[in-house]
Image (cartoon, grey):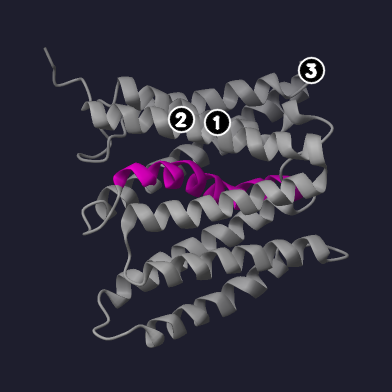
Amino acid sequence: MTTALEPRPSTRARQLAAAVAVAGATALLVGAPLVLGEQGRLAAVVVLQAALAAGWVAATAPAGAVGVAVLALAAGVVADLLVTAADRPGPGAVLAVAGPALLASVLHQMLRRPPRRDVVGSLGATALLVAAACALALLLLPDVAGDDADPAGSPLLVVGAALAAGHLVDAVLPRPAVAEGVGRGVPGMLLAVAAGVAVALWGSGTGALVDVVTGVTTGLVLGLVAALAGLATSFALADAWSADGARPAAGVLGDAVLPLAVCAPALLALAVV
């Protein structure tokens, strides 16, 4: 007998799939540099940029979908190359790509065949994916993703743990809901932050007071950012899945990768503090 506290099977399966996808994406970002060095990190970021562009477009079916995906992926790859090729890499290279890419999105709308359906929605999808793809390029900057020699201390593990924990809890207990129709609950938000703190403490080192304070602070900041990023992604996908031609199953990729992109500026901020 189904009770009001149980999520629909499709919602439960989607949350579980998203948790697995988040874990896989995090493992790829942390593990690839251990095997292939900096080229491995670059390859991992490009794979996630492609997965985000393809998955989001398939899930939400924006007008001019092919152009939206191509623009986002091209912007991400160019940002990756500029960051890795710079003698003194910095976030300025990412901003230098995002601006022209958004101008190119207007040209993309002009080149669409009339009647141009949902121009505003298509521009919004392009802006979102361009910003997210460029944000993922920030993970290529020094120290943003952590020390390759100390994968256990990578802040990416904190973010990944928080995101995965939120999805797992929401698969079992999505009540009380943050909002109807989103499938995310208050317990998932709280336990996502708690998971971030736990992983940050685990990776903080010796157990000295300064390490504990650092771990708790890092876990609270990144756990909260990750929880809010995951919630915002679920809101965006819940609205978009009602569009004609949308494929909700493909939204698992967006649920996994977009929050990682949203958290990248927070990782950059922690790296420079």
- Kind of residue at badge 3: Ala
Q: State the residue at coordinates (57%, 54%).
A: 49
Q: Give yes or no for contact between labels 3 and 2 (Cβ–Cβ under 8 Å).
A: no
Comes first in the chain, label 3 or label 2: 2
Q: State the residue at coordinates (61%, 36%).
A: 26
Q: Is residue 103 left or right of residue 169?
A: right
Label 3 secondary element: loop
Disc number lying in front (3 or 1) = 1
Q: Nearer the viewer, residue 261 or 53?
A: 53
Mark drawn on residue 208 = 3
**Which x, y percent locates residue 117?**
25, 76
Label 2 secondary element: helix
Q: Give yes or no for contact between labels 2 and 1 (Cβ–Cβ under 8 Å).
A: yes
Tell me if mark 3 has few (under 14), some (14-19) or many (20+) residues whose alpha carbon lies within 10 angstroms of its own: few
Q: Is residue 187 left or right of residue 160?
A: left
Tell me if mark 2 has few (under 14), some (14-19) or many (20+) residues whose alpha carbon lies within 10 angstroms of its own: many
Q: Residue furthest left?
A: 1
Relative vertical location of residue 98 with respect to residue 212 in this rendering, above or below: below
- C-alpha distance separating marks 3 and 1: 29 Å
**Which x, y percent locates residue 4?**
14, 21
**Residue 273 visible to the viewer:** no
Relative vertical location of residue 78 with respect to residue 202 in this rendering, above or below: below
